[in-house]
Image (tube, rainbow, N blue to C red):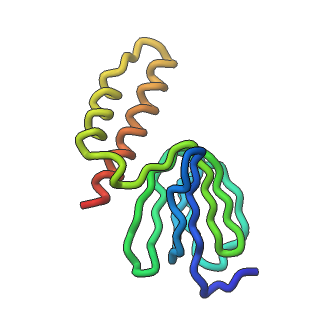
Amino acid sequence: MADMFSNIRCLVITPEAQVVDAEVLDVVIPAYDGLRGVYPGHACLLCLLGLGLLRYHDLQNRSHVVFIEGGFGHVCDNEVTILTRTALTADAVTTTEAREQLRQAEGQPTSTIEEVQARRAAIRRAKQLLTLTLSRE
């Protein structure tokens, strides 16, 4: 079992790049069924990720936010590993781009159930991206 007073290593990995590799104080994972808070000494966990914002505090207690879009999270021995198809840091998207994505999502058609579901998913994604960009301020 890992020392409950040590730090956590947080890794966020996409097929293209390792987006985060940091020693952190805590991590909040956007699991498919809700947020999961992870602190040193946390029990081992494997979870399906949803769309949302991964949050963590670095060793200087500064807050960081990363947009995550699906994948898997693994927690064990004070290490959090996130494998995801998309991971964007706050500097990867501008507020203007996020607002434009939201505007486009809100303008999508709603004639069929499939279109309604696609529109809802696009709006949710755009709102999470907008929240990500606002986390810089």
Quarter of the image with the C terminus in it: bottom left
* Residue 97 found in image quarter: top left
* Residue 104 found in image quarter: top left
User: Residue 71: x, y in percent?
Assistant: 62, 46
Q: Is residue 27 above or below residue 89?
A: below
Q: Residue furthest front?
A: 16
User: Residue 127: x, y in percent?
Assistant: 35, 42
Instruction: Report if residue 33 is visible in the image.
Output: no
Quarter of the image with the N terminus in it: bottom right
Q: Nearer the viewer, residue 11 or 130?
A: 11
Q: Nearer the viewer, residue 117 or 68?
A: 68
Identified at 55% across, 56% down, the residue is: 18
User: Residue 119: x, y in percent?
Assistant: 41, 26
Identified at 71% across, 69% down, the residue is: 76
Q: Nearer the viewer, residue 124 or 100?
A: 100
* Residue 10 found in image quarter: bottom right
Q: Is residue 7 above or below residue 13?
A: below
Q: Is residue 114 above or below residue 92?
A: above
Instruction: Report if residue 106 is visible in the image.
Output: yes
Q: Nearer the viewer, residue 16 or 92?
A: 16
User: Residue 35: x, y in percent?
Assistant: 54, 58
